[in-house]
Every structure is written in structure tokens, then in C-alpha cells.
Image (tube, helix red, strand yellow):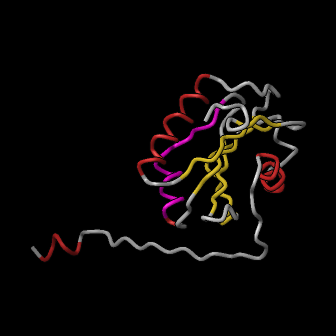
């Protein structure tokens, strides 16, 4: 029995907030202004990326999580990773953001499906999915503003 115990991995969880400036998000425009600071504008039309803005209960930004980088037309959104990061930093809410290298702001059926699945998953964990935003070099589209969340 002692051999079995020594072969089990120990799990450690830690979170070290680094708040220099408290950025509060009240609108989709606020979220886009913040996330663009973390986006490489030179690759925004080349490669799809997904980032998550993590918020506290006052809608202040706890941090930005770089979820994935994909190809020209897609990038993976692993809901388990999104939720694990949100839980680890005790986020009360999240905003999912991804770019469309094509410049098209219309959400794809895959975009709509993942947002629906993420919203349902967040609800179970008592985390608010405030918005999902598609950005391009010139503009953005908000699911919340368009009544899709």
C-alpha cells in the first residue's frame, strides 16, 4: 500500500495577483481597448488567437489568459482550460475574445456553438460569461451587444 501512495501526484494550486492598475470593464468597447494592448497587431490578420479576460466581482481585470493560437481559420477553445484558469484566480466573470484573420465580423456556427457551451459550463460553476468578442484589425463584434449571449 505504501508503494501506491508514493506514486500519486501532489496537486498544488496557487495564484499571485499582480495588480498595478485596476482596469474596470463596463462595455464591450472597454474590453476591446484593454485586449488590443495584449494582441500582436502584426499577426491579427494572419493567425487566429483566443484570449480570456478574467474579471473580479467589480468587473475589474484580474488578468488576461492566452488560451490558444491556431491557424488561419480556427483556434481551439478548450472549455475545461477556460474554467480551470477562471477558478484558479477566483474570477467572478470572463470575456472570451478571438480574432478573425479574414476581417469578417460575422460569428461562424462554431463560434455560436462554443459560446453556448461555454455559457452553460460557466453557469454551473457560478462564473459569468459577460461577452464573447470577435476582433479584426479595424473593428470588433460583441455577442452581448448583439443579443447573442
Magenta residues: mostly which secondary structure?
Answer: helix
Q: From the viewer's perspective, tell me whether residue 9 is left or right of residue 95.
A: left
Residue 81 included in the magenta stretch of the image: yes
Q: Nearer the viewer, residue 89 or 50?
A: 89
Rendered location of residue 145, percent (x, y): 73, 36
In the rendered image, which quarter contains the C terminus? top right
Range shown magenta: 74-87
- Number of marks in picture: 0
x then y, percent, for residue 83: 49, 53
Residue appearing at x 16%, y 69% in the figure = 4
Between 46 and 122, the one nearer to me in the picture: 122
Residue at the image point whose x is 81% and y is 40% from the top: 44
Q: Position of residue 97 (x, y in %)?
A: 69, 44
Q: Residue furthest right?
A: 138
Magenta region includes residue 138: no
Residue plotted at (68% across, 26% down):
107
Residue 23 to residue 119: above or below: below
Question: Is 100 above or below relative to 57?
Answer: above
Q: Residue at x 26, y 69 (%)?
A: 8
The image quarter in which residue 1 lies:
bottom left
Q: Splitting the image into 4 quarters, where does residue 16 fall?
A: bottom right
**Residue 47 percent coordinates (x, y):** 75, 37
Amino acid at each position: 500500500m505504501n508503494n501506491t501512495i508514493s506514486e500519486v501526484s501532489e496537486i498544488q494550486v496557487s495564484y499571485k495577483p499582480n495588480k498595478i492598475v485596476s482596469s474596470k470593464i463596463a462595455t464591450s468597447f472597454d474590453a476591446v481597448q484593454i485586449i488590443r494592448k495584449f494582441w500582436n497587431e502584426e499577426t491579427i490578420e494572419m493567425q487566429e488567437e483566443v484570449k480570456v479576460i478574467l474579471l473580479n466581482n467589480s468587473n475589474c481585470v484580474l488578468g488576461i489568459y492566452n488560451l490558444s493560437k491556431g491557424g488561419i481559420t480556427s483556434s481551439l477553445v478548450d472549455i475545461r482550460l477556460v474554467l480551470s484558469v477562471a477558478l484558479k484566480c477566483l474570477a467572478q466573470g470572463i470575456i472570451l475574445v478571438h480574432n478573425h484573420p479574414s476581417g469578417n465580423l460575422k460569428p461562424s456556427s462554431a463560434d455560436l456553438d462554443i459560446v453556448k457551451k461555454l455559457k452553460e459550463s460557466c453557469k454551473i460553476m457560478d462564473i459569468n460569461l459577460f461577452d464573447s468578442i470577435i476582433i479584426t484589425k479595424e473593428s470588433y463584434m460583441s455577442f452581448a451587444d448583439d443579443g447573442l449571449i
